[in-house]
Image (spheres, rainbow, N blue to C red):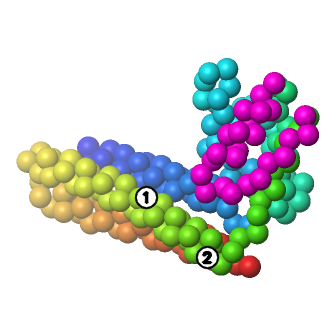
């Protein structure tokens, strides 16, 4: 029973870290990266559809990405979605066949804004991990009468060390992303 609670908490914490890492991918670092376009939704025949399902994304230069739609009739909607996506600052150009997206150079001020965004995403991940810990602790305390206080105390220590390891992992990933963002 205790092992199940710990295993479930570990699985949920790992998912929280995966979400943070996915969110970090969407914050640009000065290079055009198809992952930046992961969360762009295009209005395709009245339905919000992920850009990756409508077009192939290809990196041709450090700051240029080519978007090749599978359906040429979606070109205008794809271009509109890229233009209106927040925090991207990209300038798409449509030649009737493909869309070339040029990413602007990052200024020092913009880099610092991105660092703030990344720190907030990391903090959200840490909050998610702590809420998983809190739920697991409540579950463990509910088992005290069945398994005994000593077993619950050992499980709490194990849960605390697991939580610390996961939070430290987020801090490591955050530090790498900050370095990447501030690199000129």
Front label number (1 vs 2): 2
Above or below: residue 174 compared with residue 66: below
Q: Secondary structure at mark 1?
A: helix
Residues drawn in magenta = 73-96
Disc 1 to disc 2: CB gap under 8 Å: no
Figure quadrant of the C terminus: bottom right
Q: Quadrant of residue 174?
A: bottom right
Identify the residue at image location x=73%, y=55%.
90
Q: Is residue 110 visible?
A: yes
Task: Answer left or right for 78 relative to 93.
Answer: left
Label 1 belongs to which residue?
125
Task: Decide which of 58, 95 is in the foreground and name it.
Answer: 95
Q: Quadrant of residue 128?
A: bottom left
Q: Is residue 38 visible?
A: no
Q: Secondary structure at mark 2?
A: helix
Q: Position of residue 175 (x, y in %)?
A: 56, 75
The answer to whether residue 162 is magenta is no
Furthest toward the left, the residue is: 145
- Around disc 2, counting alpha carbons within 10 Å, would you say few (fewer than 14), some (14 to 19), or many (20 or more)? few
The tag on residue 109 is 2
- Around disc 1, counting alpha carbons within 10 Å, would you say few (fewer than 14), some (14 to 19), or many (20 or more)? many
Q: Position of residue 130 (x, y in %)?
A: 32, 59
Identify the residue at image location x=81%, y=24%.
73
């Amino acid at each position: 029973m205790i092992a199940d609670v710990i295993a479930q908490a570990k699985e949920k914490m790992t998912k929280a870290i995966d979400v943070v890492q996915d969110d970090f991918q969407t914050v640009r670092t000065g290079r055009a990266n198809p992952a930046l376009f992961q969360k762009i939704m295009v209005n395709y025949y009245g339905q919000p559809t992920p850009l990756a399902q409508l077009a192939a994304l290809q990196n041709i230069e450090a700051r240029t990405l080519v978007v090749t739609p599978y359906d040429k009739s979606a070109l205008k909607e794809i271009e509109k979605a890229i233009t209106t996506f927040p925090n991207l600052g990209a300038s798409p150009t449509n030649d009737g066949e493909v869309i070339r997206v040029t990413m602007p150079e990052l200024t020092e001020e913009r880099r610092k804004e991105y660092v703030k965004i990344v720190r907030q995403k990391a903090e959200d991940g840490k909050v998610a991990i702590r809420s998983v810990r809190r739920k697991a602790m409540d579950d463990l305390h509910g088992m005290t009468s069945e398994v005994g206080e000593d077993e619950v105390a050992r499980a709490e220590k194990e849960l605390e060390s697991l939580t610390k390891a996961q939070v430290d992992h987020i801090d490591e990933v955050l530090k790498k992303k900050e370095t990447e963002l501030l690199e000129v």
